[in-house]
Image: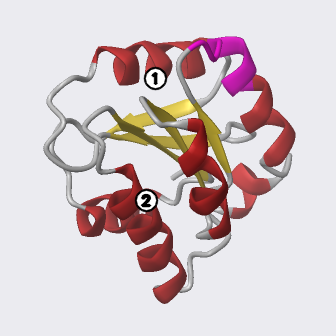
């Protein structure tokens, strides 16, 4: 059950990427900004991430990928959410993602990409600006 008025964020590490320091730092920054954060841990499948997002009733999913598998994994999470009627859950991504991949990721449904050099404040502001103010209340 959502905490009243809080944006709920699922932070996930899809695929075989074993580096999660950035995801953990992001989770803390989002928590410090007043959001409720669920972190799924390492080596999650797209199916596990989509299921957790739906089960937890999150407003947004933040995917972190450093392994190079973002072109497969990010669109797959979006596809699974849509297939289960949860296309209102926005998906954003971050990690080591070449600029040349960003247009295709966005065309396939990833709402925004935050690459190297993105600040935590930039990500916080994006989420606050793109999640409806009453989204957390509606998920209760």
Q: Position of residue 7 (x, y in %)?
A: 67, 40
Residue 19: numbered disc = none
Q: Determine whether, in the image, residue 78 is placed left or right of residue 129.
A: left
Residue 127 placement: quadrant: top right
Is residue 84 found inside the magenta-colored segment of the image? Answer: no
Q: Is residue 20 above or below residue 137?
A: above
- Which residue is the extreme one toward the front? 100
Q: Which residue is mark 1?
A: 27
What SS does tag 2 mark?
A: helix
Q: Position of residue 21 (x, y in %)?
A: 30, 14
For image coordinates 36% across by 18% down, the residue present is: 24
Which of the two discs, 1 and 2, labels the residue nearer the N terminus? Answer: 1
Q: Residues within 10 Å of mark 2 (few under 14, many from 20)?
A: many
Residue 128 placement: quadrant: top right
Q: Position of residue 84 (x, y in %)?
A: 46, 85
For image coordinates 70% across by 41% down, the residue present is: 4
Residue 53: numbered disc = 2
How many numbered dots are placed on residues in this image? 2
Q: Is residue 13 above or below residue 70?
A: above
Q: Determine whether, in the image, residue 124 is placed left or right of residue 64.
A: right
Whether residue 140 is visible, yes or no, is no
Q: Which residues are magenta?
A: 117-124
Q: Determine whether, in the image, residue 29 is placed left or right of residue 12.
A: right
Q: Quadrant of the C terminus?
A: bottom right
Is residue 121 found inside the magenta-colored segment of the image? Answer: yes
Whether residue 48 is visible, yes or no, is yes
Tell which of 2 and 26 is nearer to you. Answer: 26
Q: Is residue 100 above or below residue 41?
A: below
């Amino acid at each position: 059950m959502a905490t009243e008025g809080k944006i709920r964020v699922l932070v996930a590490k899809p695929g075989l990427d074993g580096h999660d320091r950035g995801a953990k730092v992001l989770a803390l920054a989002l928590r410090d900004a007043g959001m409720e954060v669920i972190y799924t841990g390492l080596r999650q499948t797209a199916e596990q991430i989509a299921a957790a997002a739906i089960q937890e009733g999150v407003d947004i999913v933040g995917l972190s990928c450093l392994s190079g598998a973002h072109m497969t994994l990010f669109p797959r999470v979006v596809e699974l959410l849509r297939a289960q009627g949860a296309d209102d859950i926005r998906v954003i991504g971050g990690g080591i993602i070449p600029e040349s991949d960003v247009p295709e990721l966005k065309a396939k449904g990833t709402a925004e990409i935050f690459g190297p050099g993105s600040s935590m404040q930039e990500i916080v502001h994006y989420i606050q600006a793109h999640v409806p103010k009453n989204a957390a209340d509606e998920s209760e």
